[in-house]
Image (cartoon, rainbow, N blue to C red):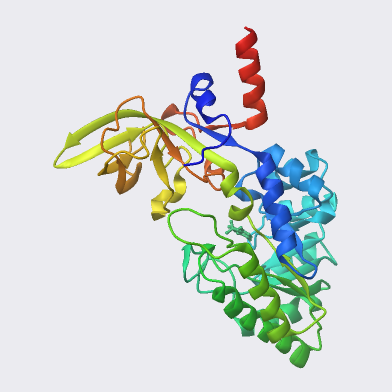
Amino acid sequence: MRYPLLLEESFELLETPYLLVDPKQVVKNYRRLIRAFKGDVVVYYAVKANSHPEFLRQLNREGSSFDVASLGEIMKLIRLGVRPDRMSFGNTIKKPKDIDTAYTMGVELFAVDSEMEIDKIARYAPGSKVFVRIHTSGLESDWPLSGKFGTDVEHAASLVDWARFRGLKPIGVSFHVGSQNYNPKNWEIAIKDASKVFNEAARRHHIILDFLNTGGGWPVKHTKPIPSVEEIASTIEDSVRRYIGSGILIATEPGRYMVGNAGTLVSTVILRSRRLGKDWVYIDAGVFHGLMETIENFRYEVLVYSKEDDKKKVFTLAGPTCDSVDVIYDEVELAESVTEGDRVIFVNAGAYTVEYGTSFNGIPSPRVITVEQLKTLSELNKTA
Ligand SMILES: Cc1ncc(COP(=O)(O)O)c(C=O)c1O
Protein backbone atom coordinates (compact mmCIF):
# COMPACT_ATOMS: atom_id res chain seq x y z
CA MET A 1 0.00 0.00 0.00
CA ARG A 2 1.35 3.42 -0.99
CA TYR A 3 0.44 5.79 1.83
CA PRO A 4 0.53 9.57 1.51
CA LEU A 5 3.61 11.53 2.39
CA LEU A 6 4.29 11.95 6.11
CA LEU A 7 1.44 9.71 7.23
CA GLU A 8 3.51 8.00 9.86
CA GLU A 9 4.89 11.30 11.20
CA SER A 10 1.32 12.57 11.46
CA PHE A 11 0.52 9.82 14.00
CA GLU A 12 3.04 11.32 16.40
CA LEU A 13 1.97 14.90 15.87
CA LEU A 14 -1.82 14.91 15.60
CA GLU A 15 -4.77 13.67 17.53
CA THR A 16 -7.21 11.70 15.37
CA PRO A 17 -9.53 11.92 13.56
CA TYR A 18 -8.09 14.11 10.80
CA LEU A 19 -8.00 14.37 7.04
CA LEU A 20 -4.49 14.64 5.66
CA VAL A 21 -4.70 16.46 2.32
CA ASP A 22 -2.31 17.13 -0.54
CA PRO A 23 -3.37 20.15 -2.63
CA LYS A 24 -0.75 19.28 -5.28
CA GLN A 25 -2.77 16.17 -6.12
CA VAL A 26 -5.76 18.39 -6.92
CA VAL A 27 -3.64 20.31 -9.42
CA LYS A 28 -2.63 17.00 -11.05
CA ASN A 29 -6.27 15.91 -11.22
CA TYR A 30 -7.33 19.22 -12.78
CA ARG A 31 -4.59 19.10 -15.43
CA ARG A 32 -5.35 15.50 -16.29
CA LEU A 33 -9.03 16.33 -16.78
CA ILE A 34 -8.26 19.28 -19.05
CA ARG A 35 -5.85 17.13 -21.11
CA ALA A 36 -8.44 14.35 -21.41
CA PHE A 37 -10.68 16.59 -23.52
CA LYS A 38 -9.46 17.11 -27.07
CA GLY A 39 -11.54 20.25 -27.53
CA ASP A 40 -12.37 23.09 -25.15
CA VAL A 41 -13.99 22.34 -21.82
CA VAL A 42 -14.96 24.56 -18.92
CA VAL A 43 -14.37 22.93 -15.55
CA TYR A 44 -16.58 24.10 -12.69
CA TYR A 45 -15.16 22.47 -9.57
CA ALA A 46 -18.08 21.48 -7.30
CA VAL A 47 -17.01 23.25 -4.12
CA LYS A 48 -19.33 21.15 -1.97
CA ALA A 49 -17.00 18.15 -2.29
CA ASN A 50 -14.30 19.87 -0.24
CA SER A 51 -14.03 23.62 0.26
CA HIS A 52 -10.58 23.64 1.86
CA PRO A 53 -9.10 27.06 1.00
CA GLU A 54 -5.86 25.55 -0.29
CA PHE A 55 -7.77 23.37 -2.79
CA LEU A 56 -9.76 26.40 -3.95
CA ARG A 57 -6.66 28.58 -4.18
CA GLN A 58 -4.78 26.02 -6.29
CA LEU A 59 -7.73 25.48 -8.62
CA ASN A 60 -8.23 29.22 -9.01
CA ARG A 61 -4.56 29.54 -9.98
CA GLU A 62 -5.02 26.77 -12.56
CA GLY A 63 -7.88 28.72 -14.16
CA SER A 64 -10.75 26.52 -12.97
CA SER A 65 -14.29 27.82 -12.66
CA PHE A 66 -16.51 26.83 -9.73
CA ASP A 67 -19.94 25.25 -9.22
CA VAL A 68 -21.48 26.72 -6.07
CA ALA A 69 -24.44 25.51 -4.03
CA SER A 70 -25.02 28.49 -1.73
CA LEU A 71 -24.10 32.03 -0.81
CA GLY A 72 -21.74 30.59 1.79
CA GLU A 73 -19.65 28.97 -0.95
CA ILE A 74 -19.79 32.13 -3.09
CA MET A 75 -18.49 34.27 -0.23
CA LYS A 76 -15.74 31.80 0.55
CA LEU A 77 -14.55 31.98 -3.08
CA ILE A 78 -14.81 35.76 -3.20
CA ARG A 79 -12.65 36.02 -0.08
CA LEU A 80 -10.04 33.96 -1.93
CA GLY A 81 -10.13 36.30 -4.92
CA VAL A 82 -12.21 34.17 -7.33
CA ARG A 83 -14.08 36.29 -9.86
CA PRO A 84 -17.89 35.88 -9.60
CA ASP A 85 -18.18 35.49 -13.38
CA ARG A 86 -16.28 32.22 -12.97
CA MET A 87 -19.00 30.79 -10.71
CA SER A 88 -22.08 28.83 -11.68
CA PHE A 89 -24.87 28.84 -9.09
CA GLY A 90 -25.73 25.20 -9.78
CA ASN A 91 -28.22 24.46 -7.01
CA THR A 92 -31.75 24.41 -8.45
CA ILE A 93 -33.20 25.32 -5.02
CA LYS A 94 -31.97 28.82 -4.17
CA LYS A 95 -33.15 31.30 -1.56
CA PRO A 96 -34.32 34.58 -3.13
CA LYS A 97 -31.96 36.52 -0.86
CA ASP A 98 -29.03 34.38 -2.05
CA ILE A 99 -29.91 34.94 -5.72
CA ASP A 100 -30.14 38.66 -5.05
CA THR A 101 -26.76 38.84 -3.31
CA ALA A 102 -25.07 36.53 -5.85
CA TYR A 103 -26.31 38.76 -8.68
CA THR A 104 -25.16 41.91 -6.89
CA MET A 105 -21.73 40.34 -6.38
CA GLY A 106 -21.50 39.57 -10.12
CA VAL A 107 -22.58 35.91 -10.51
CA GLU A 108 -24.07 35.59 -14.01
CA LEU A 109 -25.00 31.93 -14.43
CA PHE A 110 -27.78 30.00 -12.67
CA ALA A 111 -29.28 26.47 -12.86
CA VAL A 112 -33.05 25.93 -12.96
CA ASP A 113 -35.50 23.05 -13.22
CA SER A 114 -38.83 24.76 -12.49
CA GLU A 115 -40.94 27.80 -13.42
CA MET A 116 -40.79 29.22 -9.91
CA GLU A 117 -37.00 29.14 -9.84
CA ILE A 118 -36.97 30.98 -13.18
CA ASP A 119 -39.39 33.56 -11.76
CA LYS A 120 -37.11 34.12 -8.75
CA ILE A 121 -34.07 34.58 -10.99
CA ALA A 122 -35.98 36.93 -13.31
CA ARG A 123 -36.88 39.02 -10.28
CA TYR A 124 -33.61 39.00 -8.33
CA ALA A 125 -31.04 38.48 -11.11
CA PRO A 126 -32.73 40.02 -14.18
CA GLY A 127 -31.23 39.24 -17.58
CA SER A 128 -28.99 36.46 -16.24
CA LYS A 129 -27.91 33.34 -18.13
CA VAL A 130 -29.67 30.14 -17.10
CA PHE A 131 -29.37 26.46 -17.99
CA VAL A 132 -32.06 23.84 -17.43
CA ARG A 133 -31.27 20.66 -15.57
CA ILE A 134 -32.74 17.43 -16.87
CA HIS A 135 -33.39 14.29 -14.88
CA THR A 136 -31.21 11.16 -15.15
CA SER A 137 -31.77 7.66 -13.80
CA GLY A 138 -28.68 7.76 -11.57
CA LEU A 139 -28.08 4.15 -12.61
CA GLU A 140 -24.66 2.63 -11.89
CA SER A 141 -23.73 5.43 -9.51
CA ASP A 142 -23.05 5.00 -5.79
CA TRP A 143 -24.73 8.26 -4.82
CA PRO A 144 -27.65 8.90 -7.22
CA LEU A 145 -28.92 12.47 -7.46
CA SER A 146 -32.12 11.54 -9.27
CA GLY A 147 -35.59 12.39 -8.01
CA LYS A 148 -34.83 15.61 -6.15
CA PHE A 149 -33.34 17.39 -9.18
CA GLY A 150 -33.90 17.76 -12.90
CA THR A 151 -36.99 17.53 -15.03
CA ASP A 152 -38.13 15.66 -18.12
CA VAL A 153 -37.13 16.65 -21.62
CA GLU A 154 -40.47 18.19 -22.65
CA HIS A 155 -40.74 20.26 -19.52
CA ALA A 156 -37.12 21.34 -19.89
CA ALA A 157 -37.83 22.65 -23.40
CA SER A 158 -40.82 24.62 -22.14
CA LEU A 159 -38.67 26.03 -19.29
CA VAL A 160 -36.20 27.31 -21.88
CA ASP A 161 -39.08 29.22 -23.47
CA TRP A 162 -40.35 30.42 -20.09
CA ALA A 163 -36.90 31.73 -19.17
CA ARG A 164 -36.73 33.74 -22.38
CA PHE A 165 -40.27 35.05 -21.76
CA ARG A 166 -39.14 36.24 -18.32
CA GLY A 167 -36.25 38.18 -19.86
CA LEU A 168 -33.49 35.71 -19.01
CA LYS A 169 -30.90 34.23 -21.38
CA PRO A 170 -31.44 30.45 -21.64
CA ILE A 171 -28.09 29.12 -22.86
CA GLY A 172 -28.26 25.37 -22.43
CA VAL A 173 -28.88 22.18 -20.53
CA SER A 174 -27.29 20.34 -17.60
CA PHE A 175 -27.53 16.92 -15.98
CA HIS A 176 -25.81 14.84 -13.33
CA VAL A 177 -25.43 11.08 -13.89
CA GLY A 178 -25.12 10.43 -10.13
CA SER A 179 -21.98 10.66 -8.07
CA GLN A 180 -19.31 7.96 -8.39
CA ASN A 181 -20.75 6.62 -11.64
CA TYR A 182 -19.06 3.52 -12.99
CA ASN A 183 -20.21 3.55 -16.63
CA PRO A 184 -19.39 6.19 -19.29
CA LYS A 185 -22.47 4.98 -21.20
CA ASN A 186 -24.60 6.91 -18.67
CA TRP A 187 -23.10 10.20 -19.89
CA GLU A 188 -23.99 9.17 -23.44
CA ILE A 189 -27.61 8.41 -22.47
CA ALA A 190 -27.92 11.78 -20.71
CA ILE A 191 -26.39 13.64 -23.68
CA LYS A 192 -28.86 11.94 -26.00
CA ASP A 193 -31.70 13.17 -23.74
CA ALA A 194 -30.19 16.65 -23.59
CA SER A 195 -30.05 16.75 -27.40
CA LYS A 196 -33.85 16.48 -27.45
CA VAL A 197 -34.08 19.70 -25.42
CA PHE A 198 -31.70 21.41 -27.86
CA ASN A 199 -33.88 20.22 -30.77
CA GLU A 200 -37.21 21.10 -29.17
CA ALA A 201 -35.99 24.55 -28.12
CA ALA A 202 -34.93 25.25 -31.71
CA ARG A 203 -37.94 23.65 -33.42
CA ARG A 204 -40.77 24.83 -31.18
CA HIS A 205 -39.39 28.03 -29.70
CA HIS A 206 -36.69 29.12 -32.18
CA ILE A 207 -34.12 29.29 -29.39
CA ILE A 208 -30.60 28.15 -30.20
CA LEU A 209 -28.82 26.66 -27.19
CA ASP A 210 -25.05 26.23 -27.21
CA PHE A 211 -24.03 25.17 -23.69
CA LEU A 212 -24.01 21.64 -22.25
CA ASN A 213 -23.11 21.14 -18.60
CA THR A 214 -22.35 17.44 -18.18
CA GLY A 215 -22.31 17.61 -14.36
CA GLY A 216 -20.19 15.57 -11.97
CA GLY A 217 -20.17 11.84 -11.43
CA TRP A 218 -16.50 11.22 -12.29
CA PRO A 219 -15.49 8.33 -10.04
CA VAL A 220 -12.57 7.81 -7.65
CA LYS A 221 -10.81 4.49 -7.05
CA HIS A 222 -12.23 2.73 -4.00
CA THR A 223 -13.15 -0.94 -3.95
CA LYS A 224 -14.38 -1.47 -7.53
CA PRO A 225 -12.76 -0.85 -10.94
CA ILE A 226 -13.51 2.56 -12.43
CA PRO A 227 -13.38 3.92 -15.99
CA SER A 228 -10.54 6.33 -16.72
CA VAL A 229 -10.97 10.08 -17.00
CA GLU A 230 -9.88 9.83 -20.64
CA GLU A 231 -12.58 7.25 -21.38
CA ILE A 232 -15.34 9.42 -19.89
CA ALA A 233 -14.08 12.58 -21.59
CA SER A 234 -13.99 10.95 -25.01
CA THR A 235 -17.48 9.47 -24.49
CA ILE A 236 -18.73 12.98 -23.68
CA GLU A 237 -17.07 14.58 -26.70
CA ASP A 238 -18.12 11.81 -29.10
CA SER A 239 -21.71 11.88 -27.84
CA VAL A 240 -21.99 15.66 -28.11
CA ARG A 241 -20.72 15.48 -31.69
CA ARG A 242 -23.04 12.58 -32.52
CA TYR A 243 -26.28 13.75 -30.89
CA ILE A 244 -26.04 17.55 -30.72
CA GLY A 245 -23.42 18.68 -33.21
CA SER A 246 -20.59 21.19 -33.28
CA GLY A 247 -20.27 24.64 -31.75
CA ILE A 248 -21.38 23.50 -28.29
CA LEU A 249 -19.50 24.68 -25.23
CA ILE A 250 -19.00 21.62 -23.02
CA ALA A 251 -18.78 22.10 -19.26
CA THR A 252 -18.18 19.62 -16.46
CA GLU A 253 -18.62 19.90 -12.69
CA PRO A 254 -16.39 17.35 -10.99
CA GLY A 255 -16.36 17.29 -7.20
CA ARG A 256 -15.38 13.84 -6.01
CA TYR A 257 -12.83 13.23 -8.77
CA MET A 258 -11.00 16.47 -8.13
CA VAL A 259 -10.34 15.97 -4.42
CA GLY A 260 -11.11 12.32 -3.57
CA ASN A 261 -7.58 10.99 -3.98
CA ALA A 262 -6.10 14.12 -2.36
CA GLY A 263 -7.18 13.15 1.16
CA THR A 264 -6.66 10.33 3.66
CA LEU A 265 -8.87 10.07 6.71
CA VAL A 266 -7.03 8.85 9.79
CA SER A 267 -8.84 7.49 12.84
CA THR A 268 -7.98 5.43 15.93
CA VAL A 269 -9.60 2.33 17.40
CA ILE A 270 -11.24 3.21 20.72
CA LEU A 271 -12.77 -0.17 21.49
CA ARG A 272 -13.06 -3.76 20.28
CA SER A 273 -15.82 -5.93 21.68
CA ARG A 274 -17.79 -9.11 21.06
CA ARG A 275 -21.51 -8.84 21.75
CA LEU A 276 -24.55 -10.83 20.64
CA GLY A 277 -22.49 -12.97 18.31
CA LYS A 278 -20.81 -10.09 16.48
CA ASP A 279 -17.32 -8.62 16.57
CA TRP A 280 -17.34 -4.83 16.82
CA VAL A 281 -14.63 -2.26 16.27
CA TYR A 282 -15.32 1.33 17.33
CA ILE A 283 -13.22 4.19 16.00
CA ASP A 284 -13.09 7.94 16.66
CA ALA A 285 -14.42 8.84 13.18
CA GLY A 286 -17.97 7.91 12.23
CA VAL A 287 -21.15 8.67 10.35
CA PHE A 288 -21.35 12.08 12.05
CA HIS A 289 -17.61 12.63 11.94
CA GLY A 290 -16.29 12.41 8.39
CA LEU A 291 -18.04 9.29 7.10
CA MET A 292 -21.57 10.50 6.35
CA GLU A 293 -21.67 8.83 2.92
CA THR A 294 -21.40 5.41 4.52
CA ILE A 295 -25.07 5.72 5.59
CA GLU A 296 -25.78 4.70 1.97
CA ASN A 297 -23.07 2.04 2.25
CA PHE A 298 -20.55 4.08 0.26
CA ARG A 299 -17.49 1.82 0.30
CA TYR A 300 -14.02 3.14 1.09
CA GLU A 301 -10.89 1.05 1.18
CA VAL A 302 -10.32 0.65 4.94
CA LEU A 303 -6.95 -0.43 6.30
CA VAL A 304 -5.55 -1.04 9.75
CA TYR A 305 -2.17 0.67 9.59
CA SER A 306 0.87 -1.66 9.57
CA LYS A 307 -1.47 -4.67 9.62
CA GLU A 308 -2.48 -4.46 5.94
CA ASP A 309 -1.13 -7.91 5.10
CA ASP A 310 -2.42 -9.71 8.20
CA LYS A 311 -5.12 -12.36 8.15
CA LYS A 312 -8.56 -10.75 7.78
CA LYS A 313 -11.78 -11.10 9.74
CA VAL A 314 -15.24 -9.60 9.31
CA PHE A 315 -16.15 -6.88 11.83
CA THR A 316 -18.93 -4.37 12.33
CA LEU A 317 -17.25 -0.97 12.23
CA ALA A 318 -18.86 1.86 14.21
CA GLY A 319 -18.29 5.47 15.20
CA PRO A 320 -17.86 7.03 18.65
CA THR A 321 -21.27 8.63 19.34
CA CYS A 322 -24.15 7.43 21.54
CA ASP A 323 -26.32 6.92 18.45
CA SER A 324 -27.09 3.57 16.88
CA VAL A 325 -27.14 5.13 13.38
CA ASP A 326 -23.43 5.69 13.84
CA VAL A 327 -22.48 2.35 12.30
CA ILE A 328 -20.07 2.76 9.39
CA TYR A 329 -20.24 -0.76 7.95
CA ASP A 330 -22.27 -3.76 9.17
CA GLU A 331 -19.61 -5.96 7.65
CA VAL A 332 -16.08 -5.04 6.69
CA GLU A 333 -12.87 -7.04 6.56
CA LEU A 334 -10.15 -5.78 8.88
CA ALA A 335 -6.93 -7.26 10.23
CA GLU A 336 -7.91 -10.01 12.67
CA SER A 337 -5.62 -8.62 15.39
CA VAL A 338 -7.07 -5.08 15.27
CA THR A 339 -7.09 -3.55 18.72
CA GLU A 340 -7.40 -0.37 20.76
CA GLY A 341 -4.91 2.31 19.65
CA ASP A 342 -4.53 0.99 16.07
CA ARG A 343 -4.83 3.57 13.31
CA VAL A 344 -7.65 2.90 10.86
CA ILE A 345 -7.12 4.59 7.49
CA PHE A 346 -9.78 5.50 4.92
CA VAL A 347 -8.07 5.73 1.55
CA ASN A 348 -9.04 8.39 -1.05
CA ALA A 349 -11.40 10.11 1.37
CA GLY A 350 -10.86 13.73 0.29
CA ALA A 351 -14.43 14.24 -0.99
CA TYR A 352 -17.68 14.60 0.96
CA THR A 353 -16.10 13.74 4.29
CA VAL A 354 -15.14 16.80 6.33
CA GLU A 355 -17.70 18.94 4.44
CA TYR A 356 -20.43 17.15 6.40
CA GLY A 357 -18.96 18.48 9.62
CA THR A 358 -20.95 18.20 12.84
CA SER A 359 -20.00 18.39 16.49
CA PHE A 360 -22.70 15.87 17.43
CA ASN A 361 -22.22 14.51 20.96
CA GLY A 362 -19.71 17.33 21.52
CA ILE A 363 -17.18 15.48 19.38
CA PRO A 364 -15.45 17.83 16.91
CA SER A 365 -15.46 17.12 13.19
CA PRO A 366 -12.16 15.69 11.84
CA ARG A 367 -9.84 18.59 11.17
CA VAL A 368 -8.00 19.05 7.93
CA ILE A 369 -4.24 19.29 7.72
CA THR A 370 -2.22 19.81 4.56
CA VAL A 371 1.04 18.01 3.87
CA GLU A 372 2.80 21.42 3.99
CA GLN A 373 1.34 22.21 7.43
CA LEU A 374 2.44 18.83 8.64
CA LYS A 375 5.98 19.44 7.40
CA THR A 376 6.11 22.72 9.32
CA LEU A 377 4.73 21.03 12.42
CA SER A 378 7.29 18.27 12.09
CA GLU A 379 10.17 20.81 11.78
CA LEU A 380 8.92 22.74 14.80
CA ASN A 381 8.71 19.54 16.75
CA LYS A 382 12.30 18.63 15.90
CA THR A 383 13.66 22.04 16.96
CA ALA A 384 11.59 22.19 20.16
C1 LIG B 1 -25.00 20.36 -9.27
C2 LIG B 1 -23.86 19.47 -8.93
N1 LIG B 1 -22.78 19.49 -9.72
C3 LIG B 1 -21.70 18.72 -9.46
C4 LIG B 1 -21.67 17.90 -8.36
C5 LIG B 1 -20.43 17.08 -8.10
O1 LIG B 1 -20.64 15.75 -8.31
P1 LIG B 1 -19.47 14.69 -8.15
O2 LIG B 1 -18.90 14.88 -6.82
O3 LIG B 1 -20.12 13.39 -8.37
O4 LIG B 1 -18.46 14.98 -9.24
C6 LIG B 1 -22.80 17.80 -7.53
C7 LIG B 1 -22.82 16.89 -6.39
O5 LIG B 1 -23.73 16.79 -5.62
C8 LIG B 1 -23.92 18.63 -7.82
O6 LIG B 1 -24.99 18.63 -7.03
* Percent x, y of residue 330: 29, 48
Q: Front-most of 375 and 147?
A: 375
Query: In the shown orientation, is residue 43 left or right of residue 146?
Result: right
Q: Looking at the figure, which quarter contains the C terminus?
A: top right
Image: 28 above or below 248: above
* Percent x, y of residue 200: 71, 89
Q: Front-most of 125 and 302?
A: 302
Q: Which residue is located at x 78 percent, y 62 percent?
A: 109
| Residue 141 visible from this viewpoint | yes
Query: In the shown orientation, is residue 384 left or right of residue 56?
Result: left
Q: Front-most of 12 and 267?
A: 12
Query: In the shown orientation, is residue 193 left or right of residue 12?
Result: right
Q: Which residue is located at x 51 percent, y 54 percent?
A: 221
Report the number of discs. Answer: 0
| Residue 75 visible from this viewpoint | no
Q: Which residue is located at x 52 percent, y 39 percent?
A: 264
Most distant residue in the top direction = 384
Query: Quadrant of the rendered structure where residue 23 is?
Result: top right
* Percent x, y of residue 130: 76, 68
Image: 229 above or below 173: above
* Percent x, y of residue 165: 80, 78
Q: Quadrant of ligand 1?
A: bottom right
Q: Front-most of 111 and 55?
A: 55
Q: Which residue is located at x 49 percent, y 24 percent?
A: 11
Most distant residue in the left direction = 277
